[in-house]
């Protein structure tokens, strides 16, 4: 593995018994999907499995300083793939998502906390749907 490159993998499972109690979802759906997209029948999914992999790496270190207003530290990318199996009743749905995130690491007005605006270009292969999302992250080291 090269310096400043990283790999993250996840395997998640959630089982719910909705006849005894109703608990909120802590399950992470594949990127590009959301629980709100399902009809009410699917909101009571009983058994969900998910796997994902991410490969993150820097693209460029411009170190651009625009006076005391903006400092662009780094441009980085994250290539991802997600897959899930959501079961409700006697039926199940397969979901998958692949794509790339491009993020900037910047500092505004000499504020210590770095901001990371970015974009996500993704595809849902089973649906043949492509999507674009805008991303924003604030890193709070030490908190």
Image (cartoon, rainbow, N blue to C red):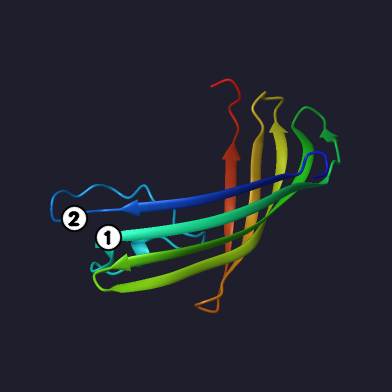
In this picture, residue 27 sits left or right of residue 74: left
Q: Position of residue 120 (x, y in %)?
A: 62, 58
The residue closer to the viewer here, 103 or 53, is 53
In this picture, residue 76 sits left or right of residue 101: right
User: Are the residues flagged by discs 2 and 1 in contact, CB closer than 8 Å?
Assistant: yes
Q: Which residue is mark 2?
A: 18
Q: Secondary structure at mark 1?
A: loop
The residue closer to the viewer here, 129 or 89, is 89
* Disc on the earlier residue, 2 or 1: 2
Does 12 sit above or below residue 125?
above
Q: Position of residue 57 (x, y in %)?
A: 76, 47
Q: Which residue is mark 1?
A: 46
Q: Secondary structure at mark 2?
A: loop
In this picture, residue 138 sits left or right of residue 112: left
User: Which image quarter is the N terminus in?
Assistant: top right
Q: Position of residue 8 (x, y in %)?
A: 62, 47
**Residue reaching furthest left?**
20
Which residue is rendered at x = 16% and y = 48% of the image? 21
């Amino acid at each position: 593995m090269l310096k400043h490159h990283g790999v993250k993998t996840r395997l998640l499972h959630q089982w719910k018994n909705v006849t005894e109690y109703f608990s909120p979802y802590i399950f992470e759906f594949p990127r590009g999907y959301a629980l709100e997209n399902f009809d009410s029948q699917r909101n009571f999914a009983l058994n969900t499995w998910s796997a994902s992999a991410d490969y993150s790496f820097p693209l460029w270190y411009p170190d651009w300083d625009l006076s005391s207003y903006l400092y662009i530290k780094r441009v980085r990318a994250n290539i991802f793939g997600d897959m899930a199996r959501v079961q409700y009743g006697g039926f199940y749905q397969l979901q998958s998502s692949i794509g790339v995130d491009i993020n900037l690491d910047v500092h505004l007005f000499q504020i210590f906390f770095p901001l990371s605006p970015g974009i996500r270009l993704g595809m849902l292969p089973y649906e043949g749907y492509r999507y674009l999302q805008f991303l924003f992250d604030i890193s709070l080291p030490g908190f």
